[in-house]
Structure formats: structure tokens, C-alpha cells
Amino acid sequence: MGFNKHKIYDLLINDINNIKAGQRLKEFRKDNKITQLKLAQILNTNQSVIANYERGRTVIATPFLYSICKKYNISADYLLGKIDSPKYLN
């Protein structure tokens, strides 16, 4: 998404694991003291959508992922469970 200068990661996982991505989203939300309801309001959606992401029922929609990453300077690849580091971008 163009948030940093790294183009290739050494330990990149190509597939998205919905469960891991959901856990990462929940971890991010709790680290930033954001409720599901508040995140839903930020993304202009409803709480059940966020709950479904966190339960791994669906992968987070690209526009929502982009908004979170841009606003909080967090790696999309990290949130999706594709890499373990770096979590936050410089």
C-alpha cells in the first residue's frame, strides 16, 4: 500500500489466515484502547462487521484495512498475519 520503503520481506506468508488476521485486529484494537463499536464508527460500518473480522469469519475489507493502517501507522501485512515484524511503520 506504499506505507514504507520495504518492498520484500524475508518471511512473507502469501496466504491470509482469517483467524490470525482477526486476532491481530483485536490485539491492535485493545492496544489502542478502541472498542469494537468505536472502530466501527471510525470505519463507518457496524459493530457486527468488526466482530466477524475478529472471529475470523471474514477477512478485513481492503478499504477498512487501508484506513486503519493509514490512521494508526500499522503494517497491513502485520495485521493480516503475513509478517510478524515490523508491526508499526516508521
Image (cartoon, grey):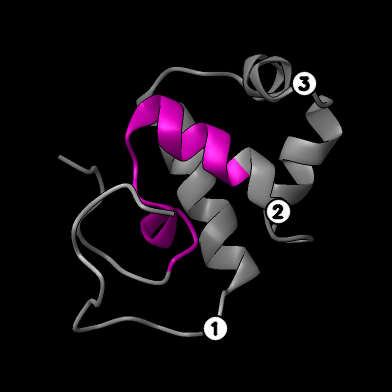
Q: Main secondary structure of the magenta part?
A: helix
Q: Residues within 10 Å of mark 1 (few under 14, many from 20)?
A: few
The residues bearing labels 1 and 3 have C-alpha atoms spaced at a distance of 27 Å
Task: Give, as a single range, the part of the protein colored magenta.
Answer: 65-81
Q: What amino acid is found at the position of numbered circle 2 in the picture?
A: Arg
| Picture disc at residue 15 | 1
Q: Identify the residue shown where x is 80% and y is 27%.
A: 47
The amino acid at mark 1 is Asp
Do tag 1 and tag 2 residues touch (Cβ < 8 Å)? Answer: no
Q: Does the stretch in magenta take in 76? A: yes
Question: Which residue has dot 3 on it?
Answer: 44
- Number of the front mark, 3 or 2: 3
Label 1 sits on a secondary structure element that is loop
Q: Earlier in the sequence, mark 1 or mark 2?
A: 1
Is residue 30 toward the left or the right of residue 2 in the image? right
Residue 54: % across, % down: 65, 48
